[in-house]
Amino acid sequence: MKYYLNELRLLIGYTSNSTSHLEKVISAIGGLFSISAILWSTHVLIELGLLDPTGGVLVIASMGASAVLLFAVPHGALSQPWAVVGGHIISGLIGISCFKLFGNTFIVAGLAVGLAIGAMYYLHCIHPPGGATALTVVMGGSSITDMGYQYLLVPVAINVVVILLFAIAYNSLFNWRRYPAHLAHRLKKTLVTKPKDRQFELTHEDFAAAMQELDSYVDITPEGLADLLELAKQHAEKNITHPTEILAGHIYSNGKIGSLWSIRQIVDAAPVGSKPHRDKVIYKVLAGDGGYETNICLRSEFHLWARFEVIKRNQQWIKVENEESDVH
């Protein structure tokens, strides 16, 4: 049963989240105040006589989705300034044009969103809320369609400017959340590496080739990917040996990547010092390849399979540090 539940979890994309509670709260507060800032600033402009309130549209609904990206994943490629500006303005332009040319039929609504996706792809500004902006223009009713291209200025452009300025200011309060992502990358301390100890070094060209072969949009900037992989390599270099002992109750990883990765727990084991042909262990797969299977093998075979001992922390499997181990 657990196997099928795990397959269902993977199928629907329900993944673990290791983000701290502090980060979650910071993101939620950012979303709260960003939308409030948009409404407040628009109201101030109306009070100053700089905006005409007759349009009745002060904030577009897709700003809520933008707030999720800007404050929950501020370093994501979909959250960067050009993605936000281009995604909303270009999609809004396409939506208005489609309505003026073809009306507000169902097929026109789909056409507006489809063209917006294509335009965002080719103009390097993919921002999912932009699709909602295009759709809102076509299906939003007369209060929006009567505004015509003025809709791009009020409320779209004003909303975009306010939420971007707020994102820059708010995320700057936390040194690990600098926005745009390029600022976070530049302000990071230079990573300490040991090139001479490595068999090879990944380069930006390698990343580009791999992403091209993947042929799917990845929501991470090249700089962010480079930092992530560099940290992963440094972490891997901390322990390149097999565990000293294979003990009952302990959990081990084979250290593989992708579909070959597996986590196993020793359920039971023969007493230490048993004859080689009787020195067996019973293990259960907790995650990864062979999910939730139970099997038996020689302790020596398991020892060769195991790369290092792991524990579960913040819903993620991590290495047990400072483990005494033998090199094989």
Image (tube, helix red, strand yellow):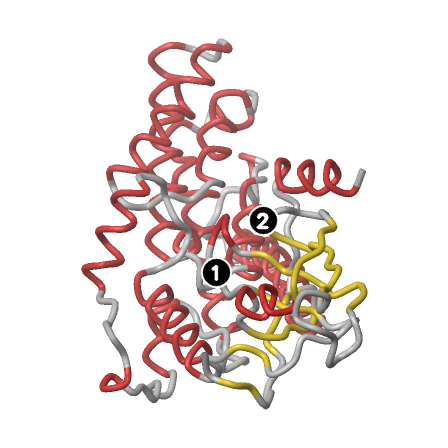
From this view, report whether residue 170 is shown above or below residue 85. below
Q: Earlier in the sequence, mark 1 or mark 2?
A: 1
In this view, the residue in front, 61 or 262, is: 262
Q: Is residue 252 left or right of residue 168?
A: right
In the picture, the quarter occupied by the N terminus is top right
Q: Residues within 10 Å of mark 1 (few under 14, many from 20)?
A: few
Q: Which mark is residue 304?
A: none
Spot occupied by residue 196 in the image (x, y as percentages of width and height)? 23, 86
Q: Nearer the viewer, residue 113 or 77?
A: 77
- Residue 64 pos. (x, y %): 59, 47
Mark 1 vs 2: CB contact within 8 A: yes
Callout 2: few (<14), some (14-19), or many (20+) C-alpha neighbours within 10 Å? some
Residue beneath label 1, please?
256
Label number found at residue 289: 2
Q: CA distance from mark 1 to mark 2?
A: 10 Å
Give the image location of residue 165, x and y in percent. Answer: 45, 65
Identity, as a three-letter code, of the amino acid under mark 1: Lys
Counting from the top left corner in percent of width and height, residue 178 is at: 45, 74
**Where, by quadrant of the figure, is residue 142 drawn?**
top right
Most foreground residue, 217 or 48:
217
Q: Secondary structure at mark 1?
A: loop
Which kind of residue does numbered mark 2 sit on?
Answer: Asp
- The image quadrant of residue 12 is top right
Q: Residue at x 29, y 49 (%)?
A: 211
Quadrant location of the C terminus in the rendered image: bottom left
Q: Residue at 56% across / 26% down in the picture?
A: 143
- Residue visible at 32% across and 79% down in the picture: 186
Q: Is residue 94 left or right of residue 164?
A: left
Above or below, comparing residue 195 to residue 108 in the picture? below
